[in-house]
Image (cartoon, coloured by chain):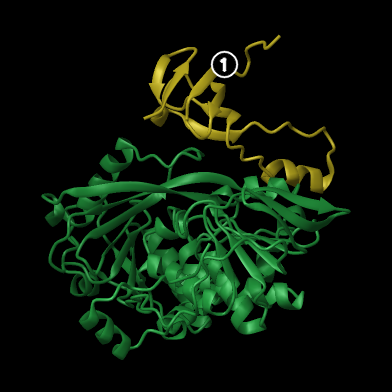
Amino acid sequence: MLLILCPHCGPRNADEFSFGGELVPRPGPDPGPEAWRNYLYTKENLAGWEGEQWFHLSGCRRFLEVERHTITNEIRSVRDVTEDTA
Amino acid sequence: MTTRGPIARYSAFSLIKQSLTGQRWSRVWRHHDLQPSYDVVIVGGGVHGLATAYYLARNHGITNVAVIEKSYLGSGGSGRNTAIVRSNYLTPEGSAFYDRSIKLYEHLADELNFNVMFEQRGHMTLAHSDSSLRTMHWRAEVNKMAGIDSDVIGPPDIKRLAPAIDVSNRPRYPILGALWHPPGGIVRHDAVVWGYARAADRLGVHIHQQTEVTAIDVTAGAVTGVQTSGGRISTPVVVNCTAGWSSLVSALAGVRLPITTRPLQAAVTEPVQPILNPVVVSGSLHVYLSQTARGELVFGASVDPFSSYSARGSLEFAEGLAGHVLELMPSLSKMRLLRQWSGLCDMTPDFGPIIGMTPVAGFYVDVGWGTYGFKAAPVAGEQTAQLLATGVVPDLIAPFSLDRFGRGDLTAEKGAAAVGH
């Protein structure tokens, strides 16, 4: 079982969330087809700490940024995407 | 280290002699010291890597080949899949490809001189909704065009072929029909790994277990060698056949892939008398089951809901699986699960594999096999070997090139497992 500490709802089972995959930097406004498809498809698929997007589907319905270790499934940090990182 | 002599062929006579004299069985493949250079280095000692090595040697006479495996042979997906083969895919390119694989499987035991226990018991994909039944008809027609034995059958035929399945109106999702594919079945997956390893070894291929590739040397856009835990190997050709770890191995050569690694869990029950002959799959319930020759029922499901390199099982999986299996076969309610395990699947965005060249000269991939790699191993090995030997991309694998993603030319193979439809 994977527990995610939602900043709004507290610790919840990963079943409640929808996994959005690793965070990939969005290309600029006019990236051209190749850069756009690269953004859509190509993944780092890291074995280690990975920044990911999760959506709390059956909870607060907020998009979250989660730092998870992809080998141990340990979670280091969770924050709402709208939260200021500075 | 010792290098044993050539491996004897198995025959009825040799088996009887062995059993009467009680001698120790000889090694199935030999140990070799790592050579400083090879013509081809295959990374990954699973069924894809070993099949590629075997066909390179047998079909093209290229025998100065090393298969490098960081653990033991078949330790990844090759020994963790549910051993199902079929060719009733949705797209013409998918059907043609897997049909070739079944043809190779049919003669594999004879060709490798190793019993791979291929049982063509038939493969049944259940439909629980009108839309699902419509897809079954679509798949059946695509398959028939490719000359593949595949048809839609109704509940009475399902009951006849697999009496343990509940075809009544009782379940939450009653069974409306099924796609019936007689050539499908199950193969002993470990035997395929060992059979290819043994046959490749006989032809001169070197198999190196417990040897991990730590770096791939690329000079001026071309592969020049690999660094391994056992030393450096100089080689102009490296083939990545590492399934769940393929992103990490490709990254060593500076090649990025459209792959995410997801665990897929499976489970097996205690052995019982024969109760289920065909392979039964339900896309809607995300479950597939078959009974092994030993009598255990093997269950598989769809991939886990998030990516991971962890091969741990979860209670959620066992719970969901049991519920779905009992929907199909209520008579199994007293059965006990013996164990559950998980394997790592290299999933691509279009559920099609990635085979062929990469932007780095001499670096080839045979990856992205997701949840369908075992059934494809013979044809993938054969075609990859042909590509390596001739330098020309064979027609069968042309739709599965890495550059299709940059061109936006995806394969849309929804007939793959792990896709509810």
> The numbered mark 1 sits on a residue in which chain?
A
Q: Quadrant of residue B123?
A: bottom left
Display colour for chain A: yellow
B394 to the left or right of A32: left
Amino acid residing under circle 1: Arg
Q: Give the residue at x 54% y 71%.
A: B51
Looking at the picture, how far across and down is residue B19, in whole percent? 23, 80
B340 to the left or right of A37: left
Residue B131 visible at all: no
Q: Give the residue at x 67% y 63%.
A: B35
B186 to the left or right of B59: left
Q: Which chain is green?
A: B
Looking at the picture, how far across and down is residue B44, in whole percent? 57, 58
Looking at the picture, how far across and down is residue B111, in whole percent? 46, 85
- Pointer 1 local density, CA inside 10 Å: few below 14, some 14–19, many at least 20: some
Q: Residue furthest right?
A: B220
Q: Is residue A51 above or below residue B68?
A: above
Q: Give the residue at x 67% y 67%.
A: B399
Q: Give the residue at x 40% y 55%.
A: B80
Q: Is residue B259 above or below residue B6?
A: above
For the C terminus of chain B, the quadrant is bottom left
Q: Which residue is mark 1?
A: A79
